[in-house]
Image (tube, rainbow, N blue to C red):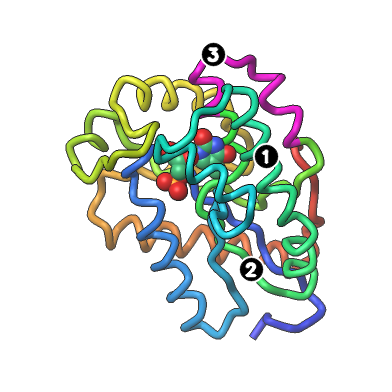
Amino acid sequence: SGCNSESRGALVVLEGLDRSGKTSQSSRLLKYLEGLGHSVELWRFPDRSTNVGQMISSYLSNKSQLDDHTIHLLFSANRWEKRSLMETKLKTGTTLIVDRYSYSGVAFSSAKGLGDEWCKAPEIGLLAPDLVLYLDIQPEKAAERGGYGDEKYEQLEFQRKVAQCYQVLHDASWKIVDACQPIEDIEKQLQELVLECIMACQKGKPLANLWS
Ligand code: TMP
């Protein structure tokens, strides 16, 4: 197969509103790629296992209050603390499926009214995804799915703003997938897109930094 140890892994990010199906599709992708014999890991942001991640988790569950700028920088710091490990994994041939990344960072904070450019600044220099899979769902549909828990951002009005903020972030690395299709149809589309991306990375597509 094309999985020689010289080639790098792909950085694949899943984005979308809360309840868009990112998390279940991420684990399906992981199983699929493992089944094909790829070296692959599933990551997610926020990574709640670190000290910074615990501060974020406490904020999201309304156990602590933080200024909007402060929490924004913590989300960003939480990605920075994983950057070098991320680069090592990719360079040694492991593909990373990442459930949320810098786009969530910018979309959720700018939905609160923080400026786009200000929100993007701390993300500059993080690794740029090779592929962003955006699971597209109307906020009303996502809310109907139920399971909006008690976390801070899981409210229809706010998710509407987030959806608008995501729209201005689309670039060439984005593929928009209709998240209202049957789960298996979405799964198939994601598989094809990811395989294509992994192939391009194996063929030497260079790693880049945000925002490019
Ligand atoms: P999760 O439900 O995927 O664990 O994400 C928790 C919440 O944090 C979710 O509502 C999106 C939000 N978020 C941000 O506001 N900024 C970020 O940088 C990330 C990664 C998530």
Disc 3 is placed on an element classified as loop
Q: Mark 3 points at which residue?
A: 113
Compared to residue 153, the image places residue 199 above or below, namely below
**Is residue 29 rendered to the left or right of residue 172?**
left
**Residue 95: mark in rendering:** 2
- Magenta span: 107-123
Residue type at numbered disc 2: Thr
Which badge, 2 or 3, comes first in the chain's sequence?
Answer: 2
Few, some or many C-alpha atoms within 10 Å of disc 3 (few <14, some 14-19, many ≥20)? Answer: few
Residue 133 position, x and y percent, is 50, 48
Disc 1 is placed on an element classified as helix
Give the Cα distance between marks 2 and 1: 22 Å
Q: Which residue is drawn at 64% across and 86% down?
A: 1
Residue 192 shows up from this direction: yes
Of residues 207 and 85, the one drawn nearer to the viewer in this rendering: 85
Few, some or many C-alpha atoms within 10 Å of disc 2 (few <14, some 14-19, many ≥20)? Answer: many
Q: Which residue is drawn at 55% across and 50% down?
A: 54
C-beta proximity under 8 Å, tags 1 and 3: no
Q: Name the residue under label 1.
A: 76
Residue 167 position, x and y percent, is 50, 25
Which badge, 2 or 1, comes first in the chain's sequence?
Answer: 1
**Is residue 116 rendered to the left or right of residue 61?**
right
Disc 2 is placed on an element classified as strand
The CB of the residue at mark 2 lies under 8 Å from ligand 1: no
Residue type at numbered disc 1: Ser
Residue type at numbered disc 3: Gly
Few, some or many C-alpha atoms within 10 Å of disc 1 (few <14, some 14-19, many ≥20)? Answer: many
Query: Which-is-in-front pick, marks 2 and 1?
Result: 1
The CB of the residue at mark 1 lies under 8 Å from ligand 1: yes
Give the Cα distance between marks 2 and 3: 34 Å
